[in-house]
Image (tube, rainbow, N blue to C red):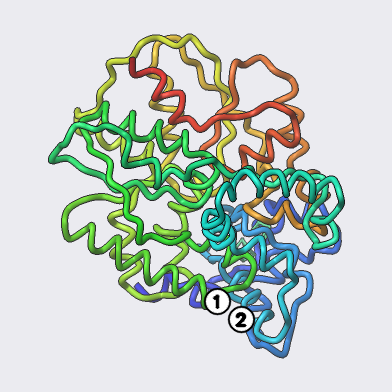
Amino acid sequence: MSDTKAIFTGDRCLSCTSCMANCPVMAAIKDYRGPKLVGPAHGRMHFSQEDVEESLNYCSNCKSCDRACPSGVAVSTLNMLQRAEYYKTHPHLRSEDMLAHGERMANLIRKIPFGATFSNLGMSIGKALGVFSALGIAGERNMPAYAATPFKDAFGSIKQQPSNKKVVLFTGCYINDNEPHVGNAFVKVFNANGYEVLIDRQFKCCGSPLVVTGFLDEARSHADNNVARILDWKRQNIPVVSPCTSCSLMLKEEYHELFGDDKFHEAATNVYDAFEFLELLEERGEFNDNFKPLNQKLLYHVPCHLKSQAIGLPAADILEEVGGVKVQLADAGCCGISGNYGFRKDKYEISMKIGAKLFERVKQGGFDKVICDCGTCRMQIHHGTDVKPVHPIEILAAAYA
Ligand code: SF4
Ligand code: SF4
């Protein structure tokens, strides 16, 4: 299995430039030398701390290059590995430290009485006073507001029927801290399919924000922790399911590409995207399709990190089964935010330029709701259009009476 670790894939590069033709950042900014040059070429020739490829900083880890590559080169992960080398000899900016450690920040805030309320107020004031901009965070953006109660704290009050069919919900940071209603919808949908939902408070952030900001040792420690938990659930025959496509991609694929141990492959066999799991139930004839009609036209922005999982579009397939629901694909490429990338002051304009085609499509209208499985894509669409998208599982939850 070791040949799927990213550093072993660079030698497969054919120099075909397909990755460059499909890189949204390269199309948006001329200073970026592009995935072939900063990924396999640079990695293969050098991959050292001394030899730095400055334009690597532009890569957003959207993974469009990986999907375009005919040779299976893990271009984006090569980029992230080299970025981590860079930060061994260069200090992180304060904005990078803040954006990489959203989970740490949320935990600190939760320890203060009314911390979420004060923090949300503080973020609004901070934005108005230009504090975020001074720290290197895009002043145009609203930071995601903290929910009054995180999902994991409210979870115990959700009433569920006990069942011998169980899944563990991997909430990820965004659903836990900012959008717990998505977690509630997940529980409703899985309960309707006869599953009892568990949570595991020992899970940490999947590590995606750490990887893209070059905190690779910390990401490795999160990966070791999370994989130990996933393997423990696997021994109990209980799958781990995530409604966040960036979390599920990290757990299923990126851990192994980055770190190589076979345990990451083994753990990946026990991790599912939420709608991937529901589609598997359907294939086994175990899916509850007793829906009430909804009569909604949905515009679906498919996140890059779902496309990278190569599992098709299970959310669209399932939602089309609800009476009166029509799903139309936005088909407008990357939204441009790529996790915390678009929150960086120096990347904001690139991020908005990449998202322009999608914003245009959303502004054309002709739908009732926009759906998207990724929390940061939802933020970007809201920011670029004033249309607030929902997670597809919220639509499915509404279809179960
Ligand atoms: S991950 Fe995205 S931004 Fe980075 S090189 Fe690949 S296509 Fe370009
Ligand atoms: S698409 Fe793959 S093979 Fe082609 S240049 Fe890029 S990394 Fe090399």
Q: Earlier in the sequence, mark 1 or mark 2?
A: 1
Horizontal placement of 209 versus 386: left or right?
Answer: left
* Among the 4 quarters of the image, the one containing residue 117: top right
Is residue 28 or residue 343 the one in the foreground? 343
In what element is the residue under mark 1? helix
For label 2, count other residues whose C-alpha is less than 10 Å away and answer few (under 14), some (14-19) or many (20+).
Answer: some
Is residue 45 or residue 121 the one in the foreground? 121
Q: Are marks 1 and 2 in contact (CB under 8 Å)?
A: yes
Considering only vertical position in the picture, is 312 above or below 51? above
Q: What amino acid is found at the position of numbered circle 2 in the picture?
A: Arg
Which residue lies under the disc numbered 1? 11
List the single residue furthest toward the left: 164
Q: Quadrant of the N terminus?
A: bottom left
In what element is the residue under mark 2? helix
Q: CA distance from mark 1 to mark 2?
A: 7 Å
Residue depicted at 40% across the width and 47% down the height: 152
List the single residue furthest toward the bottom: 50
Horizontal placement of 79 versus 165: left or right?
Answer: right
Q: What amino acid is found at the position of numbered circle 1 in the picture?
A: Asp
Residue 47, x across and y down, in percent: 63, 84
The quadrant of the rendered image in which ligand 2 is seen is: bottom right
Residue 109, x across and y down, in percent: 58, 56
Q: Nearer the viewer, mark 1 or mark 2?
A: 2
* Circle count: 2
Which residue lies under the disc numbered 2? 44
